[in-house]
Image (cartoon, rainbow, N blue to C red):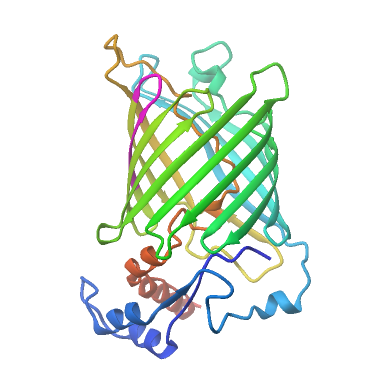
Amino acid sequence: YQTLVMEFTLPLALYRDYLQQPCDAANACAALQQLRQQMRFFSSDNSNPEPIQWEIAQQQPLRFAPEVVFSLGSYYFVGTEVGEADYSLSLLTAISQTLWQGGVLRAEWETPFTHTDDFEDGRWYTPYRRRSGWSEAMLHQTFRPLANLYNMTSIGHYAHSYNALFNTTRWTNADGKHRLRARFGSLKHQGEGNDVNTWDYSYRYYLEPLNVALGAAYSKHILEDEGPTFSLVRSFGDSSIILFYKKTVEKLGGIAIQIPFATRRSMTPRPYQFRTQERWMAGLQTTMDTESGMNILLPDHGIVPLTGHRLERQYFNSDEMSPAHLLHNLPRLREAASLIVDSQAVK
């Protein structure tokens, strides 16, 4: 009941040989090279001469099978004139249900649980304190009109205070090294706040030998400031380091890290799913080279609004579901297989 992203085939005997044969630290074994040569990737229903038949989709009707995901919400300021470290933290509990092919209903409740004194009423960071309530409740519909072309439309309640409509269109070439994406958002405030219209056009190139993604974008952000963004993402397994530079009302630069926030097993054979969010990101941003020479805090600038359910996260494994990325990271199959074998041995 989801949208096809990619199918791949490989000789099962060769795959077993690869898992069983020892490889050196550089993963330079014959089975790995043969596996890379014989893997075949297909991005559409008609391109695979022997398409995979999903028996479970043919035999079982759609049922109520909710997925509950827990994640951490945070606002934080580090090394400012106000304090060395200030933060406001909350627990985000999201429940989602697939309604039909590509159609998902998702709602998220936020529960704040701690913050520093500077987030108290009347203090410096009061507007950034995490809030209690429904932070998001949206209907998402994903289509794939052409091979490697995807579109997601989202409508509903967003960021506690908005009625929102979002649309994302994404295209990649056959091996996934090149990606083009366009995102649009229309946010109508439910109270007396300002309405917002945003857009974001981006290009990403995956440099396979270095496991690095280079990105460039031009965006109109949530405060209606606009300008270019340049980024570099270096992946290390499920973790990554991100460097970025933005030019809006000022020049902004920073670094972020993304680390696993859950086990590598994201699904269990039950009619319901309880898990934590796969990854958690944290970073620092600073203002660079201002005309006044002062490091002015601009935490709301350079932000493109994102929904909790989106193409990169739900369908493309944080933008890592591509033939080029999978081929480069084939050695991780051995690691995952060894974890399963070890867990079964313990049982």
Q: In this view, does 296 lie above or below 35?
A: above
Q: In this view, does 8 lie above or below 308?
A: below
Does the segment drawn in magenta span residue 243?
yes
Q: Is residue 283 above or below residue 196?
A: below
Magenta span: 241-251
Q: Nearer the viewer, residue 242 or 260?
A: 242
Q: Nearer the viewer, residue 24 or 52?
A: 52
Main secondary structure type of the part rendered in magenta: strand
Query: Looking at the image, which residue is at 34% across and 67% down?
Result: 329
Q: In this view, does 77 lie above or below 343?
A: above
Tell me where residue 159 appears, x and y as whole percent. Answer: 63, 32
Left or right of 347 on screen, residue 15? left
Query: Looking at the image, which residue is at 37% across and 58% down?
Result: 177
Tell me where residue 96 appears, x and y as whole percent. Answer: 69, 52
Left or right of 146 on screen, residue 296? left
Tell me where residue 213 appears, x and y as whole percent. Answer: 34, 51
